Amino acid sequence: EAGVTQFPSHSVIEKGQTVTLRCDPISGHDNLYWYRRVMGKEIKFLLHFVKESKQDESGMPNNRFLAERTGGTYSTLKVQPAELEDSGVYFCASSQSYRRYNEQFFGPGTRLTVL
Amino acid sequence: GQNIDQPTEMTATEGAIVQINCTYQTSGFNGLFWYQQHAGEAPTFLSYNVLDGLEEKGRFSSFLSRSKGYSYLLLKELQMKDSASYLCAVSKGGGNKLTFGTGTQLKVEL
C-alpha cells in the first residue's frame, strides 16, 4: 500500500510570492488533514477534509492560506502571499473513517522556507 | 485550551528500558497517540490508548490514566535505531484532529 505523498519536499520562496503544496493521501482514505510545524514548536493542526468537504478549518492561520480537495482525492494548500512566519514543515495525514481508532498516516512533509 | 507536556530530551543505553512521560490538559478527549519521527521523515504510528491501562505492542508499551491526564511510552530492549523524536498527541473532537506535544528527542548510546 502506497503511503501519503507530498510535493514538493522542499520549497524556498521570497516573501510575497505564492506557493502551492500538494498532498496525495492513501487511496480510499476519506479523511485528510493538514498540519504545520514551525521551528522549535509543536506540530499544529490546520484543517480537516472529509472527502471534498472542509470539516474543520479552525487551525488555518489567516486568509492567506487556501486549501482545496476537489474530487475528494488529492489536496492542495496554497499560501498567497507568503510571509516570513509561514516558514516551517507542512505535514499532510490521512485516515479511514471506519477504523476503530482513526489512525492517521503522515506524509514526509514539505519544508517551506520564506526569505 | 490544550497543553501537552513531555520532556525535551532523554538519553538511554542500548539494551536498556526507557519511559517517556506525557501529561495533558484538554477539553474533549477521544484518545492518546504516540508517534515516532526520525529526522526528515514522516511521523509513524506507534500506539493508541483510549481506555485507562497498558497497551503492549512488541518492544513498545503505552499507558494511559485519563483521570490524571497522564500517559507514558515504554521502550524495552533499546536499539540504536530507536534514536528518534517521540510525539505524544491527543485526539479530540468529531474529526479526531490531533494536538501534539513538542516531542521528546531520544538518544540511544552504546
Image (cartoon, rainbow, N blue to C red):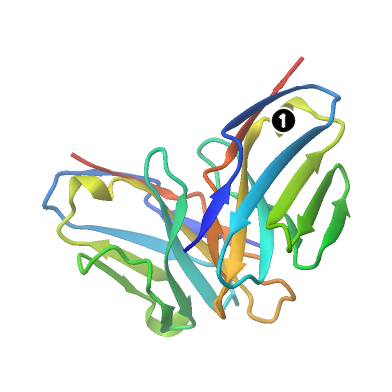
**Which of the 4 quarters of the picture holds residue B51?**
bottom right
Judging depth in this view, the residue of A3 and A49 nearest the camera is: A49
In which quadrant will I find the C terminus of chain B? top right
Judging depth in this view, the residue of A27 and A86 nearest the camera is: A86
Question: In x, y percent, where is residue B16?
Answer: 85, 26
Q: What secondary structure is marked by label 1?
A: helix
In percent of the image, x 83 and y 48: which residue is there?
Answer: B61
Question: In x, y percent, where is residue A40?
Answer: 41, 38
> In this orientation, does residue A85 appear?
yes
Residue that sits furthest to the top in the current view: B110
The crowd level at tag 1 (other Cα within 10 Å; few <14, some 14-19, many 20+) is few
| Label total for image | 1
Residue that sits furthest to the left in the current view: A16
Question: In x, y percent, where is residue B19?
Answer: 77, 37
In percent of the image, x 69 and y 81: which residue is there?
Answer: A98
Question: What residue type is disc 1 on?
Answer: Lys
In the rendered view, does A57 fall on the left or right side of B42?
left
Q: Name the chain letter of the residue that bears numbered label 1.
A: B
In percent of the image, x 50 and y 60: which residue is there?
Answer: B2
In percent of the image, x 74 and y 25: which residue is there?
Answer: B80
In the rendered view, does A91 fall on the left or right side of B21?
left
> In this orientation, does residue A26 appear?
no
Question: In x, y percent, where is residue B96?
Answer: 58, 72
Q: Compared to A65, does A8 lie above or below?
A: above
Instruction: Name the residue beneath numbered marker 1.
Output: B81
Q: Compared to B79, does B68 lie above or below?
A: below
